[in-house]
Image (tube, rainbow, N blue to C red):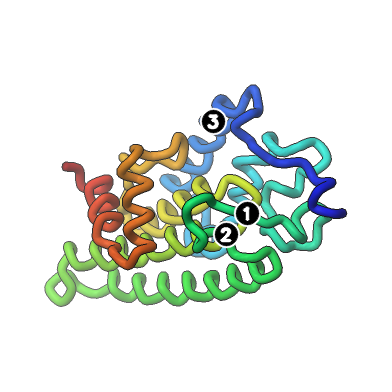
Amino acid sequence: MHPSDCPAWEYANHPKREEILKQRTLDILRGLYEQTFDSLEIAADSREIHRYLFGLLTPREEVYFAGHYRGEDFPCLKYYEVIIPGDYRVGFPSAIVVAQMEILEEEIREGIKSLDTIHQTPNDQISPEDKLINSVIFACGVFYTVLRIHPYANGNGHAARFILWAILGRYGYWPLKFPIEPRPDYPLYTQAIEEYGNGKPELLQNYILQCIIGD
């Protein structure tokens, strides 16, 4: 199907968007808290979570928008491109999205394996503070990479925030002031992401640290 024949997907226009996302976000957070999810698997591949969050919010004929990457072999996803005005770095071409997400998946698995080793090390060898900082640095890097690739037709921010929660929650760190739904504090949220993309990761990292430990 030619892209011009495909509907635009803006879940924010759905009349029950707020109600659905609120309840489904609570459901997935409960899964993280109660450890009914495998945090490694859902951080490495967020498609099932994306499907659960947005499955009731897609166009009727394009339910596959939820839970599948741009570039996957579906009529209106295979050539689905995204453009973020003002930031040419965001939104990889659909033809390479799946491959890039496979690379990221492996990086997440390797990164979590390293973090697991760090967190299993006695505190007199690696301090609790250093364990926290290492975890936040890694989670922020993954978060930004997901946003930069923009693998989904929509809902990329929710997916990226969930992945960050899954990584940090694995070690008991809960960024309570960095919600999955609704979008976090504006304009700090946007500014932190922009600075990260400009090679200045400290604002985002410190923002997440504050969301975990408080002001």
User: Is residue 35 at all visible to an observer of this figure?
Assistant: no
Gap in angstroms between the C-alphas marked 1 and 3:
28 Å
Q: Which amino acid does the dot numbered 3 rest on?
A: Gln
Name the residue carrying label 2: 91
Q: Looking at the rendering, in which quadrant would you find the C terminus?
A: top left
Name the residue carrying label 3: 23
User: Of residues 27 and 61, which is closer to you in this image?
Assistant: 61
Q: Which amino acid does the dot numbered 2 rest on?
A: Gly
Name the residue carrying label 1: 82
In the rendered structure, which disc, 1 or 2, sits on the residue that comes first in sequence? 1
Q: Residue at x 32, y 67 (%)?
A: 199
In the rendered structure, which disc, 3 or 2, sits on the residue that comes first in sequence? 3
Instruction: Mark 1 and mark 2 in contact? Answer it, CB < 8 Å.
Output: yes
Q: Is residue 14 above or below residue 72?
A: above
Which label number is shown at residue 67?
none
Q: Which amino acid does the dot numbered 1 rest on?
A: Val
User: Is residue 157 at all visible to an observer of this figure?
Assistant: yes
Q: Residues within 10 Å of mark 1 (few under 14, many from 20)?
A: some
Q: Residues within 10 Å of mark 3 (few under 14, many from 20)?
A: few
Q: Residues within 10 Å of mark 2 (few under 14, many from 20)?
A: many
**Front tag of 1 and 3:** 1
Q: Residue furthest right?
A: 1
